[in-house]
C-alpha cells in the first residue's frame, strides 16, 4: 500500500502543479486514496520532495532529479546497480559518504555523476567508498534520504 501511494504521489507531483499538502491530499482523494496529514507529511519527507519555483514564480512540490531517474521503472539499470553495489549511505556536514562492495565505487560514482544530482559540487571514488560534496548540509541530508528511498524500495527488476 505504501509503495503504491508513494508511486502515485510521485506521479501526481510530476504531472500537476501541487503547491500544498492539502492540494496533494485532494489529488490523492481524487485517485481513491484517503490519507491523514501526518501520513502525507511523512510521505513527503520519505520521498525527499522539494519545493521549487516554476516559470511563473509559483512554488510547487517537485521530485528531485535523482529520484525521478533512479526510481524510474524505465531506468532499472541504475536501480539494479545501486541495489547490488551500495552497502550504506551517510553524511557528515555537507559530505555524503556512500559505502559499496569492494571494486564497485567507481561504477556507482559514474552512474551518480550521470544523473546530474542537484547541488552536487563533485565526487571522489575509491575502491569501496564515494565522497560526494554537496553545497549545504541540507542538500546532503536530502540526498541521503533519496538514496535510502531508492536502496530500500522493493521494486527492483
Image: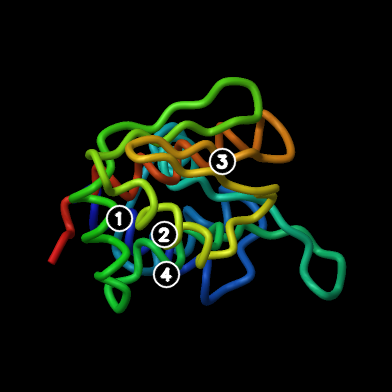
Q: Tell which of 141 and 45 is nearer to you.
A: 141
- Residue of label 1: 5
Front position among marks 3 and 4: 3
Which is more N-terminal, label 4 or label 3? 4
Q: Marks 1 and 2, Cα distance to the nearest angstrom?
A: 6 Å
Cβ atoms under marks 1 and 2 closer than 8 Å: yes
Q: Tag 4: Cα neighbours inside 10 Å, few (<14), some, or many (≥20)?
A: few
- Residue of label 3: 132
**Residue 148 shown left or right of residue 58 in the figure:** left
**Residue 152 shown left or right of residue 140 in the figure:** left
Cβ atoms under marks 4 and 2 closer than 8 Å: yes
- Residue of label 2: 9
* Residue 86 found in image quarter: top left
Helix, strand or loop at label 2? It is helix
| Mark sitting on residue 114 | none
Front position among marks 1 and 3: 3
Q: Marks 4 and 2, Cα distance to the nearest angstrom?
A: 5 Å
Spot the residue most to the left.
Answer: 157
Q: Marks 3 and 4, Cα distance to the nearest angstrom?
A: 28 Å
- Residue of label 4: 11
Spot the residue most to the right.
Answer: 57
Which is more N-terminal, label 3 or label 2? 2
Q: Tell which of 21 and 91 is nearer to you.
A: 91
Q: Tag 2: Cα neighbours inside 10 Å, few (<14), some, or many (≥20)?
A: many
Amino acid at each position: 500500500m505504501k509503495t503504491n501511494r508513494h508511486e502515485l504521489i510521485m506521479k501526481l507531483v510530476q504531472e500537476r502543479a501541487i503547491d500544498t499538502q492539502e492540494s496533494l491530499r485532494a489529488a490523492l482523494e481524487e485517485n481513491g486514496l484517503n490519507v491523514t496529514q501526518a501520513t502525507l507529511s511523512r510521505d513527503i519527507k520519505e520521498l525527499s520532495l522539494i519545493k521549487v519555483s516554476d516559470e511563473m514564480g509559483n512554488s510547487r512540490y517537485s521530485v528531485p532529479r535523482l529520484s525521478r531517474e533512479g526510481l524510474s521503472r524505465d531506468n532499472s539499470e541504475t536501480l539494479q546497480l545501486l541495489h547490488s553495489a551500495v552497502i550504506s549511505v551517510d553524511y557528515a556536514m555537507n559530505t555524503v559518504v556512500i559505502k559499496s562492495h569492494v571494486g564497485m565505487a567507481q561504477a556507482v560514482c559514474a552512474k551518480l555523476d550521470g544523473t546530474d544530482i542537484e547541488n552536487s559540487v563533485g565526487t571522489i571514488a575509491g575502491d569501496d567508498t564515494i565522497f560526494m560534496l554537496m553545497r549545504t548540509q541540507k542538500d546532503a541530508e536530502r540526498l541521503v534520504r533519496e538514496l535510502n528511498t531508492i536502496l530500500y524500495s522493493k521494486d527492483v527488476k
